[in-house]
C-alpha cells in the first residue's frame, strides 16, 4: 500500500500546478523525520567526531615535538617494516660492494 501511494505521488509530482503543491506537501511531511535525523547526528555522532579529531591533533603535535619518540611509539608492524627495509638496504649495499670488487 505504501509503495502504491509513493508511486501515485511521484506520478502526480510531475504535473505543472498540482505537482508543486504535492512536492511542498511531501516536504512538509518529511520535515519532522529530517529534523530528527539532524538532531541525532548533532547529539550523538558530532561530539564523537570532534573528540576523535582532537585526539588526532594531539597525536600529531606530540609526534612533531619529539620525532625520536615517534619511532618508539609506532606499532609493531611498522617497526618490523623499518627493520626489513634497513636489512634490504644493507643487502643492496653489500651487493653493490660485491659488484665493484
Image: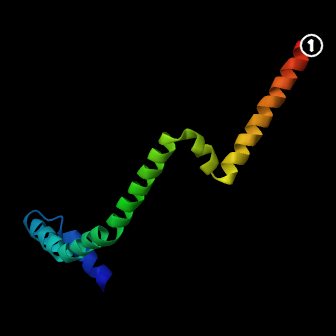
Q: Nearer the viewer, residue 37 or 92?
A: 92
Q: Which of 58 and 32 is in front in this view?
A: 58
Q: Horizontal placement of 81 versus 101: left or right?
A: left
Residue at (26, 69) in percent of width and height: 38
Quadrant that contains the N terminus: bottom left
Residue at (14, 65) in percent of width and height: 15
Quadrant that contains the C terminus: top right
Q: Horizontal placement of 86 versus 75: left or right?
A: right
Whether residue 73 is situated above or below residue 91 in the rendered picture? below
The residue furthest bottom is: 1
Q: Where is residue 20 in the image (x, y as percent from the top left)?
A: 11, 65
Whether residue 4 is situated above or below residue 52 in the rendered picture? below
Q: How many labels does the image show?
A: 1
Residue at (18, 67) in percent of width and height: 13
The residue furthest top is: 100
Q: Horizontal placement of 32 versus 59: left or right?
A: left
Q: Position of residue 70 (x, y in %)?
A: 58, 45
- Label 1: which residue? 101
Q: Where is residue 53 in the image (x, y as percent from the top left)?
A: 39, 55
Residue at (81, 30) in percent of width and height: 90
Q: Where is residue 44 in the image (x, y as percent from the top left)?
A: 33, 72
Neighbourhood count class around disc 1 (C-alpha, 10 Å): few under 14, some 14–19, many 20 upward: few
Q: Which of 33 and 67 is in front in this view?
A: 67
Q: How is the image coloured?
A: rainbow
Quarter residue 61 falls in: top left
Q: What element carries label 1?
A: loop
Quarter residue 33 falls in: bottom left
Whether residue 63 is situated above or below residue 36 in the rendered picture? above
Amino acid at each position: 500500500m505504501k509503495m502504491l501511494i509513493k508511486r501515485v505521488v511521484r506520478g502526480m509530482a510531475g504535473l505543472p500546478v498540482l505537482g508543486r503543491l504535492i512536492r511542498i506537501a511531501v516536504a512538509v511531511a518529511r520535515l519532522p523525520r529530517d529534523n530528527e535525523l539532524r538532531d541525532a547526528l548533532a547529539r550523538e555522532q558530532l561530539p564523537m567526531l570532534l573528540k576523535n579529531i582532537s585526539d588526532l591533533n594531539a597525536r600529531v603535535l606530540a609526534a612533531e615535538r619529539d620525532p625520536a619518540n615517534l619511532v618508539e611509539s609506532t606499532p609493531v608492524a611498522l617497526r618490523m617494516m623499518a627493520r626489513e627495509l634497513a636489512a634490504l638496504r644493507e643487502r643492496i649495499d653489500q651487493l653493490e660492494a660485491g659488484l665493484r670488487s
